[in-house]
Image (cartoon, coloured by chain):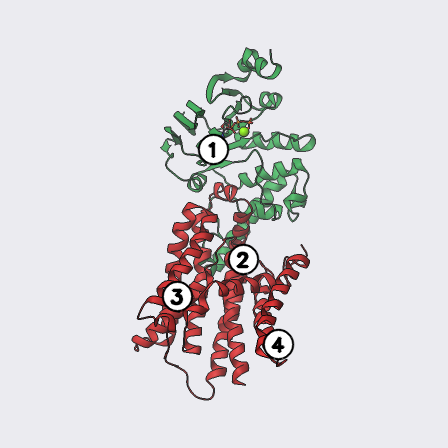
């Protein structure tokens, strides 16, 4: 039971990550790999505050974690996009690797061993279900917030910007501030997911925010359908549920580990060839 | 009367190529100015300088007497400089109506804050914009295309949509880059009529066009440009009578 709740909480948290990443790259057309590092900024900010500043309520800590992710994302996008859109991809990778090194080497973040002993906040037998309810509600809120953003007049502006940025700007629209806003909203959501993660698991390790995490979130978005509202949800469920299902086959670990890798690689390749717009995307 | 647009000593060079060489140009309200010149003369570059796509190396630009050459592209659009593009640059994944709805100077969907907290006001602004867009499409006889994707329209209608989108900006200056290239038949007539109506409504219009008969029908004044320089600025009759055009188009 606990085990299933944990999987469900993870699905909710990765739904937030995949949905917000989809807003940034699928709708906004902003190429970045650094989504997990904003997840990390939220998680570490919330975790450190929970450990060291006991008088801030948990919700306050999560909000501060989001705020830290937003500030970092505005700094990154604001400087990188001034150079060029392609530059953001490289800058985001550098930002992610640099910050990971920092997390691994700083004393107060717990170094390579990670940050542990984050207080539980919710205790008792209902801890799991309560966390699941909170994370599930947050995930739903993100999915519908992104849907509201991309469906209305704001979404129309986003697709116009993606289609023809020059014409869009010459109609009086500030493409730069719109890109930074989209980036900040997406990264802020990732930061919030980080805060929830820190409270639920009570332990953070720098390695879980590396480029493998970037690849996992990207795969969720691509499999589910980039630029669709519910695709990332499907992607998150599939990518987290399939490995668990494989576990039930009770294969020996020596076969198990490579099997998962092979299945993901085959899935991604299959989708790229057969259904490049993802499960929920229209036929390409 | 004060001109809507005035440039003074405008200069721009790309490496060795001077695309704008001491350009002094002015356009009055209600006037349709023709801008003619051979390929590579610097006509589009001049539009880019005026609208803010390019920064001049020297010189100044005034809109209704106010100096604007340090304002970025998007701010100049909000000041009321509306332009079309030689290669249209339509939003190709979007419908005709949505293409128009991005065009107003004051776009209600601009801010996420408004999306979150001002939904009532947003709906009102959207409805007003929609009426305006349908009105412009109506003037062109294109209401029935509103929900088609722009890429599904014939070329001439796409050119009209490029103009329609620009007309959502109700500012004082309209810059049209080769509106007639590739346009014939009904779309040609419509284009001519709408451009004339815009000038009659008091806008200053500048049209880059290789089609001399279009210029003759529409403009009273014409400017001839080559190698970034204005070589002649006068009535269309003077320009047609001079040797310049004959040399250009008939190679004499
Ligand atoms: N961004 C740029 N960088 C370098 N050279 C440029 C740039 N933009 C224009 N040019 C050059 O400047 C010159 C003038 O170009 P421009 O597009 O203004 O001409 P034009 O009068 O509009 O010609 P056409 O009738 O073919 O449209 C050309 O030689 C062009 O190659
Ligand atoms: Mg040109």
In front: label 3 or label 1: 3
Q: Residue at x 44, y 39 (%)?
A: B73
Secondary structure at badge 4 equals helix
The disc numbered 3 marks a residue on which chain? A
Task: State which image quarter holds ligand 2.
Answer: top right
Image colour for chain B is green
Q: Label 4: few (<14), some or many (≥20) within 10 Å?
A: few
In front: label 2 or label 3: 3
Q: Which mark is residue A150?
A: 2
Q: Quadrant of the N terminus of chain A?
A: bottom right
Q: Are marks 2 and 1 in contact (CB under 8 Å)?
A: no
Instruction: Report which residue position mark 3 lands on.
Output: A41
Q: Label 3: few (<14), some or many (≥20) within 10 Å?
A: many
In the image, residue A277 sits, relative to residue B139, either above or below, namely below
The disc numbered 2 marks a residue on which chain? A
Q: Label 2: few (<14), some or many (≥20) within 10 Å?
A: many
Secondary structure at badge 1 equals helix
Instruction: Report which residue position mark 4 lands on.
Output: A246
Image colour for chain A is red
Instruction: Report which residue position mark 1 lands on.
Output: B48
- Going from the N terminus, do you reach mark 2 or mark 3 first? 3
- Going from the N terminus, do you reach mark 3 or mark 4 first? 3
Nearest the viewer among A215 and B39 is A215
Please state the horizontal and vertical placement of residue A20, each as a whole percent of the image.
50, 63
Residue B81 appearing in the image: yes
Q: Quadrant of the C terminus of chain A?
A: bottom right
Q: Residue at x 53, y 25 (%)?
A: B40
In front: label 3 or label 4: 4
Q: Are marks 2 and 4 in contact (CB under 8 Å)?
A: no
Q: CA distance from mark 3 to mark 1?
A: 42 Å
Nearest the viewer among B192 and A184 is A184
In which quadrant of the rendered view does residue B117 lie? bottom left
């Amino acid at each position: 039971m606990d085990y299933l709740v944990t999987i469900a909480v993870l699905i909710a948290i990765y739904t937030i990550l995949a949905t917000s990443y989809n807003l940034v790259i699928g709708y906004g057309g902003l190429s970045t790999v650094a989504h997990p590092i904003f997840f990390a900024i939220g998680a570490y900010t919330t975790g450190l505050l929970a450990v060291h500043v006991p008088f801030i309520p948990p919700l306050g800590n999560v909000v501060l974690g989001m705020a830290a992710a937003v500030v970092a994302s505005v700094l990154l996008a604001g400087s990188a996009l001034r150079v060029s859109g392609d530059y953001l991809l490289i800058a985001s990778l550098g930002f992610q690797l640099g910050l990971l090194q920092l997390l691994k080497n700083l004393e107060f973040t717990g170094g390579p061993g990670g940050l542990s002993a984050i207080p539980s906040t919710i205790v008792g037998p209902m801890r799991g279900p309560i966390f699941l309810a909170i994370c599930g509600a947050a995930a739903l809120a993100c999915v519908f917030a992104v849907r509201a953003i991309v469906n209305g007049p704001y979404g129309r502006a986003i697709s116009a910007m993606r289609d023809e940025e020059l014409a869009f700007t010459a109609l009086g629209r500030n493409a730069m501030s719109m890109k930074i806003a989209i980036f900040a909203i997406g990264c802020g959501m990732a930061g919030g997911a980080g805060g929830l993660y820190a409270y639920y698991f009570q332990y953070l390790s720098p390695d879980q925010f590396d480029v493998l995490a970037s690849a996992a979130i990207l795969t969720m978005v691509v499999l589910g359908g980039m630029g669709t509202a519910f695709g990332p949800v499907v992607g998150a469920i599939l990518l987290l549920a399939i490995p668990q299902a494989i576990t039930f086959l009770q294969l020996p670990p020596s076969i198990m580990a490579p099997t998962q890798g092979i299945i993901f690689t085959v899935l991604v390749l299959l989708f790229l060839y057969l259904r490049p717009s993802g499960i929920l995307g229209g036929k390409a | 009367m004060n001109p809507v647009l005035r440039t003074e000593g405008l200069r721009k060079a790309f490496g060795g190529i001077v695309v704008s060489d001491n350009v002094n140009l002015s356009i009055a309200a209600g006037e349709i100015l023709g801008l003619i010149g051979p390929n590579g003369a610097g006509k589009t570059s001049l539009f880019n300088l005026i609208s803010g796509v390019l920064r001049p190396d020297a010189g100044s630009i005034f809109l209704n007497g106010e100096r604007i050459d340090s304002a970025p592209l998007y701010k100049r659009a909000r000041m009321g400089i509306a332009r079309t593009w030689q290669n249209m640059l339509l939003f190709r994944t979007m419908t005709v109506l949505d293409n128009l709805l991005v065009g107003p100077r004051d776009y209600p969907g601009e801010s996420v804050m408004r999306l979150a907290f001002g939904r009532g006001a947003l709906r009102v602004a959207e409805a007003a914009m929609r009426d305006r867009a349908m009105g412009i499409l109506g003037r062109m006889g294109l209401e029935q295309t509103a929900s088609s994707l722009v890429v599904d329209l014939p070329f001439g209608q796409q050119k009209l949509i490029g103009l329609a989108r620009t007309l959502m900006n109700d500012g004082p200056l309209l810059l049209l880059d080769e509106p007639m290239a590739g346009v014939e038949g009904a779309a040609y007539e419509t284009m001519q009529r709408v451009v004339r109506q815009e000038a009659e409504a008091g806008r200053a219009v500048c049209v880059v066009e290789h089609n001399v008969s279009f210029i003759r029908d529409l403009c009273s004044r014409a400017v001839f440009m080559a190698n970034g320089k204005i070589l002649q600025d006068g009535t269309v009759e003077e320009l047609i009578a001079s040797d310049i055009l004959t040399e250009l188009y008939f190679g004499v």
